[in-house]
Amino acid sequence: MAKSKDQLQELKSKGVVELGKMLKSSREDLRDLRFKVASDQHKDIRELREIRKRIARILTLLQRAPAPVEKKVEKKV
């Protein structure tokens, strides 16, 4: 339980850009691990669940992140 809280605090301290990079690498890790499990090169199936949870945490934090405010430029006529 404490391990997941520590991981969550670590993710919360990251910026949006860094979370995006972590999301991309986690998805690549998940894809590679699925191929290894399918070809019997990797036996620890529980690791798949951990990576999926990490991806879900990152997506949740990205969804809750405040959207960047766009500056409106007014045209003078």
Image (tube, rainbow, N blue to C red):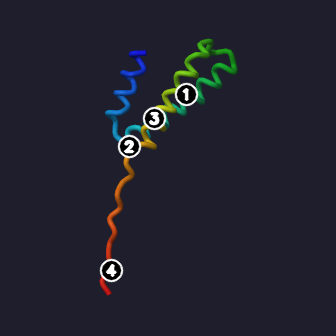
Per the image, the residue denoted by label 4 is: 75
Asked whether disc 4 touches disc 2, contact meaning CB atoms under 8 Å apart, the reply is no
Q: Which residue is mark 3?
A: 58
- The answer for how far apart the CA atoms under marks 2 and 3 are is 11 Å
Q: Position of residue 72 (x, y in %)?
A: 34, 69
Q: Is residue 68 above or below residue 37?
A: below
- Mark nearest the camera among 4 and 2 is 4
Whole-angstrom CA distance, mark 4 to mark 1, is 47 Å
Around disc 2, counting alpha carbons within 10 Å, would you say few (fewer than 14), some (14 to 19), or many (20 or more)?
A: few
Q: CA distance from mark 3 to mark 4?
A: 39 Å
Mark count = 4
Across and down, in percent, residue 53 comes to: 52, 27
On residue 52, the disc is 1
Q: Nearer the viewer, mark 2 or mark 3?
A: 3
What secondary structure is found at the residue carrying circle 4?
Answer: loop
Q: Are marks 2 and 3 in contact (CB under 8 Å)?
A: no
Q: Position of residue 6 (x, y in %)?
A: 36, 21
Q: Residue at x 62, y 12 (%)?
A: 43
Q: Residue at the spot x=35%, y=61% of the render?
A: 70
Distance Cα–Cα, label 3 vs label 1: 10 Å
